[in-house]
Amino acid sequence: MKDCFNSLVSTHLKLLSEYVNKMKIIDTIEAFRALNINASLGFVPTMGALHSAHLTLIKRSVEENELTAVSIFVNPTQFNDPRDLDVYPKPLEEDIRKCKNAGADYVFIPEIEMMYFYDEVLVETPKGLGDILEGACRPGHFNGVLRVVLKLLNIVKPKKLYLGQKDAQQLAIISKMVKDFFIDVEVVPCELIREESGLAMSSRNVLLSSDERLKALLLSKALFSARSLVGAGEDNLDAIKKNMVNILSGTSKIEYVEILARDFSTIEKVEIGNTIILVAAMVGKTRLIDNILL
Ligand code: AMP
């Protein structure tokens, strides 16, 4: 039954590949390797449910490289909450069209069974950076992220890796893995993209009801309010956090509000040019994160 389903998906993808003509849809590791790409390749790993922020990353890669590959893989090993994985949106056909329109050359859509083996060698997040914030709230999450990104880098072999500042801690941890493991790729950090309302773009935003969307705005509101306070001369971390917590009390649950140096070490007070403020909160059943650099 499962084989039958996989072969149907594969045929479907190939038909779509013809439909979108030039852009190639690759659904096996062997097929990606067989491309034998010699040109400079930019790579944008995603979990699909693509929105304008993803497309900004893809377009940037298209501008800066001869060829661009996007991966769409809802990576099960980085979901610590099975419900989160279940409800994660998966609009594959729409995503493929968006990649094509953004100018991607290859979309890599592997299946879970191809990517993982029984009893694997694992990479582990470093204690300091891996155990705080997202690492503390989502045990195992970053180990899953590193595991899949290392695999994807070894398959795709890009020159440049495009990652968003929206997932600031993920960006820092992947950059550290690239450095620590001497991986031959340049990490390109891409700025956080917001909707006009201020809401940080996220694949999870489609899960919000209209009422929840309004509550979700409290995350950016709290961050912008912190920026205004700092602009007015406030540099005391507790005072800024207290103000943010007040604003965020309208969400369902605050998971963290933290003010750190941009390398995620602690600071005594706000240092303009070297500060990041991060928040995570639940809005209904949806978990949202956001951050701002000061
Ligand atoms: P995801 O599909 O959520 O795994 O995201 C794929 C890439 O897009 C990651 O590098 C994210 O950090 C990046 N990304 C997602 N949302 C945004 C955003 N609002 N602004 C900038 N980058 C983003």
Image (spheres, rainbow, N blue to C red):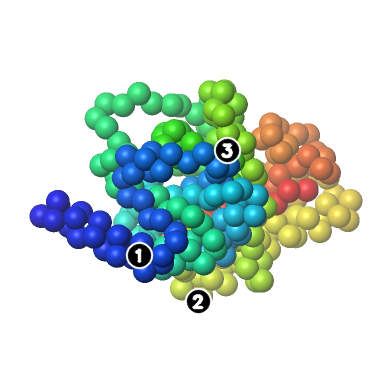
> Residue 112 has which mark?
none
Q: Which mark is residue 159?
A: 3
For ligand 1, tell me if the residue under mark 3 lies within 8 Å. no
- Which residue: 20% across, 54% down? 6
Give the left or right position of residue 173, taking residue 20 as reference.
right
* Apparent side of residue 228 relative to residue 58 in the rendered image (left or right): right
Nearest the eye: 139 or 192 = 192
The residue beneath circle 1 is 18
Q: Does 239 sit above or below residue 219?
A: above
The percent position of residue 139, horizontal first and vertical second, equals 43, 37
In terms of depth relative to the viewer, which is nearer, 280 or 49?
49
- Residue 81 can be seen, yes or no: no
Instruction: Indicate the quadrant containing the N terminus: top left, top right, bottom left or bottom right.
Output: bottom left
Q: Earlier in the sequence, mark 2 or mark 3?
A: 3
The amino acid at mark 3 is Lys
Q: Tell me which amino acid carries mark 1.
A: Glu
Is the residue marked by circle 3 packed among few (<14), some (14-19), or many (20+) residues within 10 Å? some
| Element marked by disc 1 | helix
**What is the spatial separation of the Cα atoms under label 2 and label 3, in whole angstroms?**
41 Å
- Where is residue 35, by image quadrant? top left
Q: Which mark is residue 210?
A: 2
Q: CA distance from mark 3 to mark 1?
A: 27 Å
Determine the residue positioned at 82% across, 55% down: 229
- Identify which amino acid the numbered label 2 is placed on: Ser
